[in-house]
Image (spheres, rainbow, N blue to C red):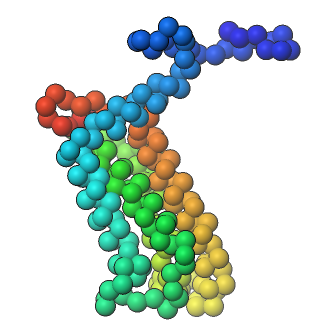
Amino acid sequence: MIAEEDGSLTAVELTRGPRDAEPRPATSGRVEAARSSLSALRGRGWLVVAASSVLIAVVVGVPTDLIDTPWFSREIPPTTWSYPVWVVTSALGGLLIGLSSLTAREAPRSEGQRGGMVGGVLTFLAVGCPVCNKVVLMVLGSSGTVTFFEPLQPFIAAASVLLLGWALVRRLSAGRCVPSRGSGVCRR
C-alpha cells in the first residue's frame, strides 16, 4: 500500500526478483515472459521467422505490385509509405509465425491470433492499388474507390501495424512458451 498525497491509500502489486533486493513492479513479469519467449527462438526459430517474413513479403508484395513482376500491374503507383508498412508488417508477421511454430501442440485461437490474421489482411488492403481491389471496386466504383478508399489506406496501414504489434505483444507477454530440453520446441 502506498499513501497518496491526498491521504488515500493505493494498492500496488510488487514482486521480488530472484536476485533483486529491491521490489519491482509486477509488470516486469510480462517483460520476463517476453524475454523467455524470444530466447526460445534459437537457430530453427529464427530461421522460421526469417523464412516467414520473406514469404509474407512475397505473398503481399507480388499481387500488390510492390515487387515488380510481369504478372501484376498497378493503375495507381505505390505511395512512399507503402514500402515501410510492407516491410514492418512482414517482419511482425514473421515473428508471430516464428513464435507460433515453437508450440508443441495447437492451442485454441486467442485474440492475439485473430489480431495477427486481421492485421495481415489489412496490410494487403493498405498497400494494394485502390482501383485494383475488385471487392472495393464493386462496392464503391472507380471514382468512389479513388475518392473514399484511397484516402483511408494510410489509416488502414496504421491499423494493420498496430494490430500485428498488439498480437505480437500478446503472444510474447503470455509467457506460454517454455523451451523443452534439447528439442527446440516449446511446451505448454
- Tell me if 64 is positioned left or right of 102 in this view: right
Instruction: Give whichever of 35, 56 is nearer the camera.
Output: 35
**Is 168 on the left-hand or right-hand side of 8?**
left
Residue at the image point whose x is 44% and y is 67% from the top: 86
Q: Position of residue 144 (x, y in %)?
A: 64, 86
Residue extending furthest toward the left: 182
Q: In the rendering, at what x and y percent does residue 21 appear?
A: 50, 8
Q: Position of residue 171 (x, y in %)?
A: 40, 41
Q: Is residue 133 visible?
A: yes
Looking at the picture, does residue 96 appear above or below residue 54?
above
Q: Nearer the viewer, residue 105 or 138?
A: 105
Q: Which corner quadrant holds the N terminus? A: top right
Q: Position of residue 148 (x, y in %)?
A: 66, 80
Quadrant in which the C terminus is drawn: top left
The residue located at (47%, 78%) in the rendering is 128
Q: Is residue 3 left or right of residue 46?
A: right
